[in-house]
Amino acid sequence: MTASHPSPPTTRTGVNAVPRTPTDTTRIQKRVLRTLFATQVLGGLAVGIGIAVGALLVEDMTGSSTYAGLAQSLFVGGSALVVVPAVRITERFGRRGGLAFGYACAVAGTLVIIAAIHLDNAPVAVLGYFLLGSASFAGLQSRYAAADLAPEARRGSHLAIVVWATTLGSVVGPSVAGLAERAWAAWFGGPEYVGSMAAIGILCVLTAAVIGVFLRPDPLLTARQISGETDAPRRSIADGFRTAKANPAVRTGVVAAALGHFVMVGVMAMTALHIKHGMADPDQALTVVGVILGLHIGGMYALAPVVGRLVDRRGSRPVLVGGTAILVAACAVAGSAPSDDHVRITIGLILLGLGWSAMTVGSAALVTGAVTPAQRPSTQGFSDLVMGLAAMGAGIASGPIVEYWGYGMLCVFCAVVALCVVPFLLGGFAGPKPAEESA
């Protein structure tokens, strides 16, 4: 926890003026939260569509579960591609530049995938999914933008508001995939899945536009002005690594976020194929998968405000412990379900989403509260880089595990991975204090 600094005097006016009073900061934060809320709805809708069609598209092109899992993992882990330049852009231009860059890369990804579909080229489609994953990166980075100007006692709640906003788009997104396909086929014709990709591209363009126009003043740059760190040296991902290495709280947050993301992606990426393989009519798979993954994404985001409130009142450690337990339970429920038991699979996927929510909100609050505004982009970027690499590792591993040993063994493996965070949570670290202790 860092000491607060008085606001420096200023005579400037307009959207880039330094806040003079706590009231000014509160007003700016309300505008930031409203803008991020809107972008998370749009971006969440794009991500939800991408999750629903990714594995199905690539399996149809290749006939292989292994390649399908690879495409899905690259979608969720595509942040590993953009995080390094995005941190540099954020350091220079603030959150607005970094977030807009992420969605612009996602638009490029949709164009690559559409070209790959027309060419029937699976490797190009996988590359496009890697770029498309930038939308997932931007959505995750938005939670940090919500925390830049948040009061310490409400940091978890403000983080959670933005995470929760994704619910409105992400829950509907998988179901919208089928609607987008039918509409595109009726209007333009062409190969399957082009309609879904076009819808994602349009949504990402709209999201980037809202960020560019309305995320003013920039929350990160404003936080640096308030703390007197405007002249602090620019930092890189390497600086974030050094911070995590030296700071036990940051290190714990990074590990918890990465392992939680690994488990979520590993199980979620192969669930669509597990369901499809158990259906008598595989043509109906997209509809069923859309409903189940929509509920899973609802579990990821819908209860985020409750999780954020628990972080504020009890601290990050108990929330991370609870998240780990829920992830293990999710693996047990989903992994023991036959492929035609859609009810049990749905329950497991909802629990999987809830456990991910606890790990993501708890770790983000822990990392943000342990560093100064000048250290945040590099440290948070390093955390998201590790999350992206974990997601790619999960997807790459999940395909072969399912192909050779089955979906149940994949869930056992992911449950073991979830438990690897326990030694870090049992260790000592001076994280941010709960609200009632810091009041």
Image (cartoon, helix red, strand yellow):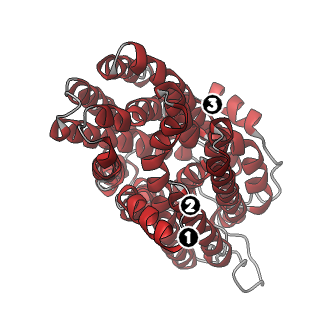
Q: Quadrant of the N terminus?
A: top right
The crowd level at tag 1 (other Cα within 10 Å; few <14, some 14-19, many 20+) is: few
Query: On the picture, is 202 further left or further right than 168?
Result: right
Numbered badge on residue 190: 2
Q: Nearer the viewer, mark 2 or mark 3?
A: 2
Distance from label 2 to label 3 (Cα)?
49 Å
Residue 15 lies, in percent from the top left, at 69, 81
Q: Is residue 126 left or right of residue 288?
A: right
Give me the C-alpha separation between circle 1 and circle 3.
51 Å
Mark 3 or mark 2, which is nearer the start of the sequence? Answer: 2
At label 3, the amino acid type is Ala
Check if mark 2's residue and mark 1's residue have beta carbons within 8 Å: yes
Between the residue at mark 2 and the residue at mark 1, the CA separation in whole angstroms equals 7 Å
| Residue that carries the numbered disc 3 in the rendered image | 244
Residue 71, x across and y down, in percent: 56, 36
Residue at 49% in and 35% down: 59
Q: Residues within 10 Å of mark 3 (few under 14, many from 20)?
A: many
Three-letter amino acid code of the residue under disc 2: Gly
Residue 297 lies, with reference to residue 278, above or below; the image says below
Residue in the foreground of this view, choosing between 268 and 314: 268
Q: Which residue is mark 1?
A: 188
Give the image quarter of residue 356.
top left
Amino acid type shown at disc 1: Phe
- Kindly state the secondary structure of the residue where label 3 is placed: helix
